[in-house]
Structure formats: structure tokens, C-alpha cells
Image: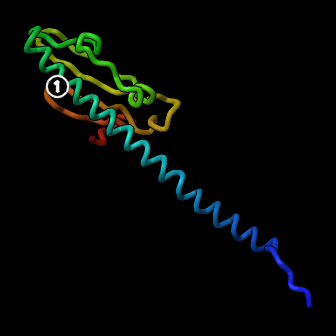
Amino acid sequence: MHKTRGFTLVELIIVITIIGILIAIAVPSYQNHLRKGRRAEAQGFLTQVAQRQQQYLLDARTYAFTLADLGLTPPATVSSHYAISIAGAANPPQFTVSADPAASTVQAADGVLSLTHTGQKQRLVSGVDKGW
């Protein structure tokens, strides 16, 4: 008798189906993991900006209006996914530094991150504060 070797079509279809299911579960989970990591990097940079703002206030008696005034540039990992901006008023001195996610990235679903001169942290997703 002749022994046949190889896979049947049914076996191949079952393996492809299992791989498809695993990919359908793994890819969104991986993207969520990347989004959280990028959010943490942006939050760390916002905190760094707030610390520099406090030092700038001690030196100049007002807050800086740009990152250049503080001598900061966002790291490439942050600037490729978020637009960092500083808003504020001179009298009384106050500021809000925010990170707006780029619409073309996975971060778009993450919402706008902001940090104020009082230390208030927000993550606004569709107008709802989700917290840091």
C-alpha cells in the first residue's frame, strides 16, 4: 500500500481560519498597547513642560508662550503622534499645555491631553474627561 503525505485541503482551511482568528484578536490589542505607550510618552513630556514653566515663572515672572522660550523640543516619538501647544495669559500668570493627537494616527481615538498651571490633568475624548 502507498502512504500519502501532505495536508488535505480541509486541514489547510482549518489552520488558515485559526490564524485569522488569532490575528483578529492580536492586532487591536497590539495597537491599544502602542497607543497607551505613546500616551505615556506625551504625558511625560507635558509634565516636563510644566516643570520648565514653573522655573520660567521664577526667572521671568510670567509663563512662556512657546516651547522655544523654554528651550524644549518634543521628542520625535511624541511629535510624530501629537501636536504640542501652550496657551496662557500673562495676567494673572497661567498656562495650559496640551497634546492634540494627529488625526491620521492610532492616537486619534486617544483624545486631547492637557495639563494646567495648577496641575489639573485632563484627557478629553469627545468632550468627556477620561482622566490621565
Q: Is residue 51 left or right of residue 26?
A: left
Specify the quadrant that holds the N terminus: bottom right
Q: Determine which residue is flagged by label 1.
A: 51
Outermost bottom residue: 1
Q: Secondary structure at mark 1?
A: helix
Residue at image location 32% in from the left, 32% down from the top: 113
Specify the quadrant that holds the C terminus: top left
**What amino acid is labelled 1 in the image?**
Gln
Q: Is residue 78 left or right of residue 3?
A: left
Q: Nearer the viewer, residue 17 or 87?
A: 17
Residue at image location 16% in from the left, 9% down from the top: 90
Residue 76 pos. (x, y %): 41, 26
101 in relation to 70, above or below: below
Q: How many marks?
A: 1
Q: How is the image coloured?
A: rainbow
Quadrant in the rendering for residue 100: top left
Residue at image location 29% in from the left, 34% down from the top: 43
Residue 79 pos. (x, y %): 41, 25
Quadrant in the rendering for residue 86: top left
Residue 17 pos. (x, y %): 68, 65
Q: Is residue 54 left or right of residue 36?
A: left
